[in-house]
Amino acid sequence: MFEPWVGENYGRSSLLGGKRILVVGESHHSEEHPVNSVVPNLTCRVMEHYGSTQARGEWMRTLDNVAWALSGKTRSDLATSLHRGELSVWQSVAFYNYIPVVLTDSARSARPTAMHYQMAVAPFEQVLRDIKPEVLIVCGYSLFPYLVRNHWPTDLAMPWDFSEDFLDVQRDDQKIRCIRMLHPSSSFSHKRWHTVISNAVASFENPVGT
């Protein structure tokens, strides 16, 4: 599995009330590593590279959009120094890609299969146990129903028909709010999604037993 990125201020920042927020992406695409390989530190390496002055690539805009949606700020609002200002937002949350192997070497050449989604169940359950998020921000309308069906199969009879902004699920004695977000690539309004996310988090009561 890929180890999740856990920001140094996870669960104790001023961002969105200090909630433990886990951003869930779909998959890794890599030119460096073979398809279906497992590179445990790849997510953390991607985030560290994202924060560097050498970072380049279209994938950066996707991470930027998430940071702006979380903070409500734009690039010009965020402080810049030797590192990208958007990394300061990511230091307040955790990030994990759901598919636990490198999916493809091109971001547009493959979609996860049923086998990939099945492989993802046990690793994601481990992530939930380890970092105990209060809020999941699920990146992509296509990922959301698979994640709900795999982990909370009785909460939605028809997860592919769900069109609301969020769903509350129960895990042991803890409630988790799952926010269903449009994939943060093209045609993504970070201002609109900041409103959705901030309203969903603000109305969420602290889970029992934390």
Image (cartoon, rainbow, N blue to C red):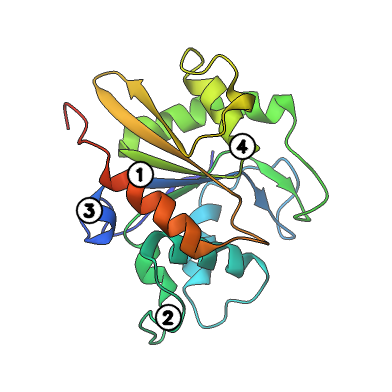
Sequence order check: which comes first, mark 4 or mark 3?
3
The crowding category of the residue bearing disc 2, from other C-alpha atoms within 10 Å (few below 14, some 14 to 19, many at least 20), is: some
- Residue 68 figure quarter: bottom left
Q: CA distance from mark 1 to mark 4?
A: 19 Å
Q: Residue at x 67, y 72 (%)?
A: 57
Name the residue type under label 4: Leu
Q: CA distance from mark 2 to mark 4?
A: 30 Å
Sequence order check: which comes first, mark 2 or mark 3?
3
> Percent x, y for residue 60?
59, 69
Q: In the rendered image, which residue does mark 4 sit on?
A: 143
Looking at the picture, does residue 78 appear above or below residue 5?
below
Mark 3 or 1: in front is: 1
Looking at the picture, does residue 56 appear above or below residue 3?
below
Residue found at the very far right of the displayed protein: 109
Q: Is residue 57 visible?
A: yes
Q: Is residue 120 visible?
A: no
Q: Residue at x 50, y 35 (%)?
A: 164
Q: CA distance from mark 2 to mark 1?
A: 30 Å
Looking at the picture, does residue 81 appear above or below residue 114?
below
- Residue 87 figure quarter: bottom left
Q: CA distance from mark 2 to mark 3?
A: 25 Å
Query: 148 or 202: nearer the eye?
Result: 202
Name the residue type under label 1: Ala
Q: In the rendered image, which residue does mark 3 sit on?
A: 17
Q: Is residue 153 left or right of residue 131?
A: right
Q: In the rendered image, which residue does mark 1 sit on?
A: 200
Sequence order check: which comes first, mark 2 or mark 1?
2
Q: Quadrant of the C terminus?
A: top left
> Percent x, y for residue 163?
56, 33
Name the residue type under label 3: Gly
The mark found on residue 26 in the picture is: none
Q: Secondary structure at mark 3?
A: helix
